[in-house]
Amino acid sequence: MERRELIKMIAALTGGAFVGGGLLTGCKSEPEIGGAAFSKDDILFLDEVAETILPKTNTPGAKDAKVGELMKVMVNDTYDEKDQQVFHKGIRDLDEACKKSISKSFMEATPEERTKFLTALDKEA
């Protein structure tokens, strides 16, 4: 599986490419927090999804890079309220898809189950 392709797919599932979407909407001087703010659980979830795609090896992984925090900043600073809501819905939808697929939430899944789930989503896409 190509990591870049999986990252694109996850970004699409969670409301658009977090970097590409941010560049298209432009930066705002004040962060706009719409209908849904990021909880600590949201950030942990995003970190775990990203770590599944880019795990720590002999180099730092996605959690080391604090990808969840980065996505929070990108979404809050560059997405309008509607797109922020789409992003948050994407987080919930991804977790629901995991529950339907393996009968566990993404956070309850083992690293192997997470990889298998995301690989299946990639093949489906």
Image (tube, rainbow, N blue to C red):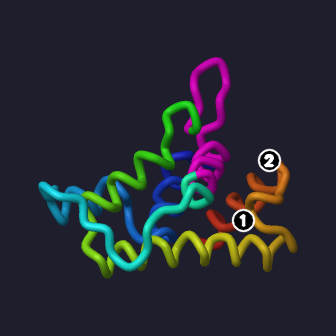
Q: Amino acid at mark 1?
A: Ala
Considering the image in quadrants, where does the C terminus appear?
bottom right
* Percent coordinates x, y for residue 108 in the rendering: 82, 59
Q: Which residue is mark 1?
A: 120
Q: Amino acid at mark 2?
A: Pro
Q: Which residues are the magenta region?
A: 44-62
- Asked whether residue 75 is drawn in magenta, I would say no
Tell me the residue at 62%/63% (across/down): 122
The residue to which callout 2 is attached is: 111
The image quadrant of residue 121 is bottom right
Q: Position of residue 16 (x, y in %)?
A: 39, 67
Decide: few, some or many residues near mark 1? Use Cα within 10 Å; few <14, some 14-19, many ≥20.
few
How many residues crowd around disc 2 within 10 Å: few (fewer than 14), some, or many (20 or more)?
some
- Seen in the image, is 112 located left or right of residue 93? right
The kind of secondary structure element at disc 1 is helix
Horizontal arrangement in the rendering, residue 104 relative to residue 29 (left or right): right
